[in-house]
Image (cartoon, grey):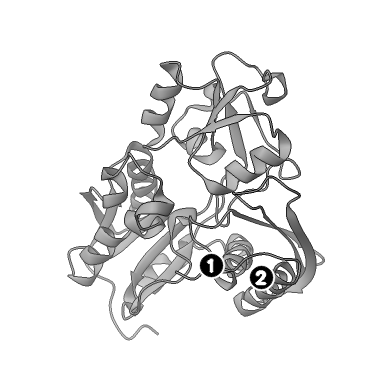
Amino acid sequence: MSLSSPPKHITIATRESRLALWQAEHVKSLLEQLGHTVSLLGMTTRGDQILDRSLSKVGGKGLFVKELESALEEGRADLAVHSLKDVPMNLPHGFSLACVMEREDPRDAWVSPQYVSFAQLPQGATVGTSSLRRMVLLKALRPDLKIEPLRGNLDTRLAKLDQGAYDGIILATAGLKRLGLEARIRGSFEPSQMLPAAGQGALGIEIMSRRGDMIEVLEPLVNFNTWLCVEAERAVSRALGGSCSMPLAAHAVLSELDSQRKSINLQAQWGDTEHIGPLVKVSKTQEIQTLEDANTLGVCVANEMIRLGVIVTHN
């Protein structure tokens, strides 16, 4: 039995980009179907405002969540909806990840008005991305490419592409699908070609740790299999000091062994942004039952990566 009653009205803090609003509206609709009254508190974050520099140079992924966390702390909102890949691996004291929802397609998408496939790109073509992960994986696939920075929300990035600034760009497949922009996807990279970022394609809901009432409210939205996978992925990144300043990929796939048992195959890759060379790659499969098991698997993979030469960052 809950020690506190759920609030009569739930307020969701959200960024105001089109994709962030879609995500918040999605959660709002699900909660309303459960009988709750819900409204949105739209906010512009520093991550949305600073578009002329890469995230790794101006404070990292936390720039997308700090204003939302202030709204939670001050009681102006009850929860915040995030793209999980934008959520720092270590939340501030007093904040908790209360819910991970069912994952959308976690793959990276190839988007280009001119080239039907990534393989068709000519030598020296220009590809847009500001993700260090995507940069090192692209360089591993095609050392000849010219990689140029690409910041802004989804619509801004697509507009820059359409204006001719790039031969193609790399975006998250999930975001394009959620906004009904699947027609822009020329193809999605399989994880064997380009391993996704930790948490990519999953939505996470953040609350104040003291809000036991909200944990109960959000429980029907939890997808535990997705949570197990992203917990393992984020544990790799957390153990390596991971942030947007680390060129790290981590992707977990869950298998049902039988009605009682599950296993996760966790792959991680790291590359040096300064020197084009072979990626450090680790893959490990382990039976998993709890989030603690998933975390342990992630730490194990991270330790193996350190042994193989990955440079740990300190934020």
Circle on res. 298: 2
Circle on res. 313: 1
Residue 237 lies, in percent from the top left, at: 58, 65
In-image side of 24 versus 201 (left or right):
left
Q: Is residue 208 above or below residue 147?
A: below
**Foreground residue, 129 or 298?**
129
- Element carrying mark 1: loop
Q: Amino acid at mark 2?
A: Gly
Residue at 33% over, 76% down = 213
Q: Name which quarter of the figure residue 249 lies in.
A: bottom right
Residues at marks 1 and 2, CA–CA distance in whole angstroms? 16 Å
Dividing the image into 4 quarters, which one contains the C terminus? bottom left
Residue at 36% over, 45% down = 20
Residue 26 lies, in percent from the top left, at: 39, 46
In the image, which is nearer the foreground, mark 1 or mark 2?
1
Residue at 63% over, 29% down = 145
Residue at 35% over, 79% down = 93
